[in-house]
Amino acid sequence: MTTTTKARKRAAAAQPEQIRVDNPATGEVLTHVPNLTAAEVAEVAARARAAQPGWEQLGFEGRAAVLRRMQRWVVDHADEVARTICSETGKAYEDALLAEINYGAAAFGFWAKQAPSYLAETRVRSAQPLVAGKKLVQRYRPMGLVGVIGPWNYPLTNSFGDCIPALAAGNAVLLKPSELTPLTSLLLAEGLAASGLPDGVFNVVTGTGATGSALVDEVDMVMFTGSTATGRKVAAQAAQRLVPVSLELGGKDPMIVLADADLERAATHAAYYSMFNCGQTCISIERCYVEAPVYDEFVDLVTKKVTALRQGVPGGPGSVDVGSLTSPAQVDIVERHVRDAVAAGARALTGGQRPHREGLWFPPTVLVDVDHDMTIMREETFGPTLPVMKVADAQEAVRLANDSEYGLCGSVFGRDLERAEAVARRLEVGAVTVNDALVNYTALELPMGGAKPASGIGRRHGKEGITKYCRQQSVLVSRWHLRRDLHTYPYRASRTRVLARLLAVLNRGAKD
Ligand code: NDP
């Protein structure tokens, strides 16, 4: 037995059989779900592999029919899904409706419609004389078994959402949701079964990080969303089998407010997109740089808006603006970032103190007098915080915005659109917005991903959002030809001279 196998057996023996799922807003125990061992994950993977060829053979239309029925299922069950999401994440009802139900329903329709064109066979033309007259085709085949490992902040959008294009491409899928939020995935699996997805094609493997690690050992491709640290581990493990990975990791998204900005809009967006989902979004506004002439007015406006937010246990629609945090470890991180900033001279204009109450809470917090020596301006806080910093001009704002290991998204607010866009284009991030934030994520046609390694590699959405779940195959068919091509054996000096002259003519290129 190898050391790794022994270590796995020990880990499996130590692994509890069930994991508890809590409501983070109330502390109530919701239920328990199985904590699958590596052997159990391998069994599920074998069943999924057996089911995959039948799913692939259904073709785009056959698969799209199932995905479209699932789109209707999500709409018909929107309230049930939203309440399940709220119960295991603590987020506000509207956060679930807008960023999860809306995304999920749209994504089923989008991938059903786009998969055939994104994955269409394409005829290729070549200038190479050796292939003149031959048919050249580039085509896509599904990887086979795709593994998706998801985080707890968006159980539908970021976890389950990545399974949709993988299924549309004809793969079987194993989804390992976060141990904190497995219930949404289990409910959606019921929806897929009710929509006619063949048995074994989609599988939720619940469990802890060890279950995620076991999944990496079974699949043909890994789609991971979560922390940069775990992303590194997953990539290193996948590299042992040379299995491709796509990683959507952390962010520290900057917002820049130029002196000519519509301050009302800028402040509204700053408050909304830093506190939305209690700040637990990889593309949340995590830090804000404001040109000096409008700094005081902006800070005043944004502080009033954040102070007015109603935070509490989510009920139905309109019950609260901001819910609780989702992960116990996350509350500690947020508290540490705020405490360290205040100890180093920052001021909390609203919020700032962790309350003594049941559940995972931290209040919406605006911080000023911050600088880049503070953790809150450098590490992903992933909580309801908005640190605001005064800058002399756009030049300084861009320099500070780019002074980060992360590069996911960024936003610039200004009335002079040409100037604002020019500033936005200088940000070293995978996506930028002008006079807006985050909504770019809902445009599934627009690729989304990191510009720096700490924010991930690969793209979700757009063509690459589905081709990454496929193997490429290049096809050459020789339709008409000589019985023996000029360049093949036996080599003869006379033919070589002809070939050499031909190659010289073809490769001489255009004159300058
Ligand atoms: P992780 O990155 O640890 O978890 C993400 C997923 O990976 C979970 O399903 C987790 O399972 C699983 N996992 C953990 N360890 C392994 C492993 N060795 N192999 C395979 N899968 C594994 O996120 P955390 O929950 O620890 O959050 C930490 C930080 O990550 C946050 O503070 C935040 O900054 C960032 N984050 C970023 C997100 C994003 O959208 N980019 C989303 C969530 C967090 P399990 O949950 O069961 O441990």
Image: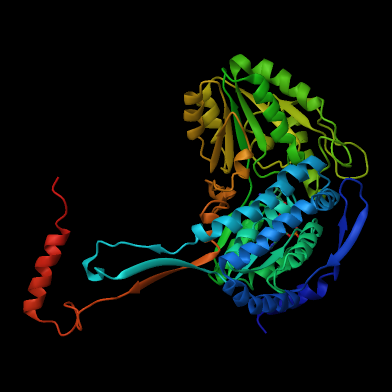
Residue 164's place in the image compared with 35, above or below, is above
Q: Nearer the viewer, residue 495 or 383?
A: 495
Residue 324's place in the image compared with 434, above or below, is below
Residue drawn at x 9%, y 66% as measured from the top left:
501
**Image side of residue 268 versus residue 93, left or right:** left
Q: Quadrant of the C terminus?
A: top left
* Percent of width and height locating residue 214: 69, 71
* Percent of width and height locating residue 344: 72, 29
Q: Nearer the viewer, residue 152 or 356?
A: 152
Residue 22's place in the image compared with 377, above or below, is below
* Percent of width and height locating residue 495: 9, 77
Residue 144's place in the image compared with 355, above or below, is below
Taking the image as four quarters, which one is ligand 1 found in? bottom right
Please tell me in which quadrant of the rendered image residue 323 appears. top right
Q: Nearer the viewer, residue 441 or 233?
A: 441
Q: How many callouts does the rendering have?
A: 0
